[in-house]
Image (cartoon, helix red, strand yellow):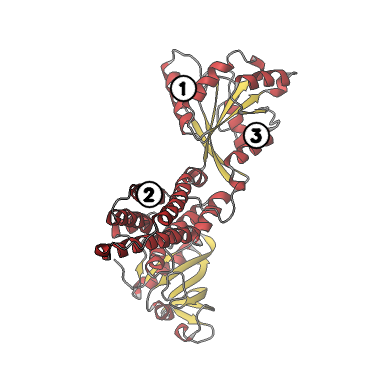
């Protein structure tokens, strides 16, 4: 699965830019670059100190290709843990490809997606959860996603898992000592103390599992469904939040017949706004299909904005409110948005009436057309995600592979707790603990196979 041959790749994005980086890693890569690099100092790279940068020229025989800066790293003090070289050249696509071709002609091979990071994992520079965080960090498009990935890449998640594994190993060691002295009827493990340790582990595993719902939406965008009756201003609100004419706005009821989605970054958090078909009774088959999709999106949303038109009063509010509540997911937050405050003189009276008809949801008056109090709505959306209440040290699970492993580990620790309470034989308790250890080890890569590694690294970009 793993060889120490020399790999090479362009690590900067495809296309033309001011600067491009060509990376090489593997035993002998510094000598390989020496064969195509003419240093201004006239000294070979193999004679230079590690972590140094050298100016010179890349040449194919007598043909000068480019002026470059070459940075050398020596094993084990590099990203991959191997000897590594980075060539900073000008961003011409032709230059990049020619340098890559020269490296391959001298014995390197093109790197597979994520192979540099995979070598870092295999050489013990990071565990598997940290390696996955590298891809998440590269893909992060908001401050929240960046913060989660950086915490994980720096080992916050790994440290927590190592602590759990250490406690579990302590329990199983004591239980297996009892098995060795079973004939003497010696008890090494105090069951009350083991119950306490298992309870602490269960609490932390449950907390990590519960964090996935937040981590997933922060990573992929918080889904916000904009719902309500026809012509209450849903499409206008979407356009206002996105600051572009994304949805068609019309006075004709039923204009929006399908869902329209787009993303926007608000105060470091990515929100995925979903404009839906207006809820009403209709004989139009196509519009009816759109309304069914509206209910589906309500069930999938993390936040639901229910718009009502202040000009229409509160006559039909209860009917539509109940329909939205019926489809709302258990974890979702519902906000009542009173639109068109610019077109009515009295806002307080209908606002108080609606407050009596709801179950205590926040009520936010706005004008989608004039953008009045849109900033207030944005602040409510950001607060609903509660990212600002989290500390930098808080661990949030955002990877589905980690979540599945944690769920299995949580089930195993529940078996441990039940076995300890029931007084079941130590060998069965020890087996459940080993199962929990197995799933925690899958996350960090202490227990892995080629298929798992292939699934992790195949989605990396080439050059990383």
Q: Position of residue 175 (x, y in %)?
A: 33, 60
Please tell me whether mark 1 or mark 2 is closer to you in this view.
2
Which label's residue is closer to the chain start, 1 or 3? 1
Closer-to-camera residue (206/71):
206
| Residue contact between numbered discs 1 and 2, judged by CB atoms under 8 Å | no
Occupied quadrant, residue 63? bottom left
Closer-to-camera residue (178/43):
178
- According to the picture, the residue beneath numbered tag 3 turns out to be 377
Occupied quadrant, residue 285? top left
Please tell me whether mark 2 or mark 3 is closer to you in this view.
2
Q: Which image quarter is the N terminus in?
A: bottom left
On residue 417, which mark appears? 2
Which label's residue is closer to the chain start, 1 or 2? 1
Q: Residue at x 36, y 63 (%)?
A: 188
Q: CA distance from mark 1 to mark 3?
A: 25 Å
Residue at the front extreme?
A: 184
On residue 291, which mark appears? 1
Does the rendering let one see residue 268? no
- Residue 386 vs residue 189: left or right? right
Question: Crowding near pointer 3: few (<14 within 10 Å), some, many (20+)?
Answer: some
Please tell me whether mark 1 or mark 3 is closer to you in this view.
3
Q: CA distance from mark 1 to mark 2?
A: 47 Å
- Residue 322 vs residue 236: left or right? left
Does the rendering let one see residue 410? yes
Which label's residue is closer to the chain start, 2 or 3? 3
Q: Position of residue 425 (x, y in %)?
A: 28, 54
Question: Crowding near pointer 2: few (<14 within 10 Å), some, many (20+)?
Answer: many
- Residue 447 vs residue 208: left or right? left
The relative height of residue 428 versus residue 376 in the rendered view (above or below) is below
């Amino acid at each position: 699965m793993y060889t120490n041959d020399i790999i090479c790749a362009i690590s900067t994005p495809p296309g033309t830019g001011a600067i491009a980086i060509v990376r090489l890693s593997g035993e002998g890569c510094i000598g390989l670059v020496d064969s195509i690099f003419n240093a201004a100092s006239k000294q070979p790279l193999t004679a230079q100190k590690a972590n140094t940068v050298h100016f010179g020229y890349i040449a194919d025989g007598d043909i000068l290709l480019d002026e470059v800066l070459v940075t050398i790293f020596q094993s084990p003090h590099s990203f991959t843990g191997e000897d590594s070289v980075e060539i900073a050249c000008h961003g011409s696509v032709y230059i990049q490809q020619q340098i890559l071709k020269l490296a391959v002609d001298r014995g390197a091979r093109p790197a597979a997606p994520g192979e540099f990071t995979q070598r870092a994992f295999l050489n013990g520079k990071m565990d598997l959860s940290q390696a996955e965080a590298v891809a998440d960090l590269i893909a992060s498009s908001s401050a929240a996603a960046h913060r989660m990935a950086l915490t994980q890449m720096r080992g916050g998640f790994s440290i927590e898992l190592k602590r759990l594994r250490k406690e579990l190993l302590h329990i199983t060691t004591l239980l297996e000592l009892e098995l060795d002295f079973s004939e003497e009827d010696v008890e090494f493990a105090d069951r009350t103390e083991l119950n306490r340790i298992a309870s602490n582990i269960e609490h932390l595993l449950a907390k990590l599992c519960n964090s996935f719902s937040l981590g997933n939406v922060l990573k992929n965008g918080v889904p916000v469904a904009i719902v309500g009756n026809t012509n209450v201003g849903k499409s206008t609100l979407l356009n206002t939040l996105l600051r572009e004419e994304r949805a068609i706005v019309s006075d004709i009821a039923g204009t929006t017949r399908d869902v329209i989605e787009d993303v926007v970054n608000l105060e470091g958090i990515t929100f995925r706004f979903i404009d839906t078909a207006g809820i009403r009774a209709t004989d139009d088959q196509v519009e009816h299909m759109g309304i069914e999709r509206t209910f589906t999106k309500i069930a999938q949303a993390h936040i639901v904005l229910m718009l009502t038109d202040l000009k229409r009063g509160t006559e039909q509010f209860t009917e539509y409110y109940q329909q939205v509540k019926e489809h709302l997911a258990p974890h979702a937050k519902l906000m009542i948005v009173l639109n068109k405050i610019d077109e009515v003189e009295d806002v307080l009276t209908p606002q108080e009436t609606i407050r009596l008809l709801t179950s205590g949801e926040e009520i936010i008056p706005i004008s989608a057309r004039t953008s009045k109090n849109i900033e207030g709505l944005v602040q409510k959306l950001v607060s609903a995600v509660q990212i600002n209440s989290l500390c930098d040290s808080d661990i949030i699970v955002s990877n589905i592979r980690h979540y599945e492993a944690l769920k299995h580990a949580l089930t195993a620790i529940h078996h441990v707790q039940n076995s300890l309470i029931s007084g079941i034989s130590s060998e069965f308790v020890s087996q459940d603990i080993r199962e929990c250890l197995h799933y925690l080890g899958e996350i960090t890569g202490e227990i892995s196979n080629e298929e798992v590694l292939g699934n992790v690294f195949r989605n990396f970009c080439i050059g990383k």
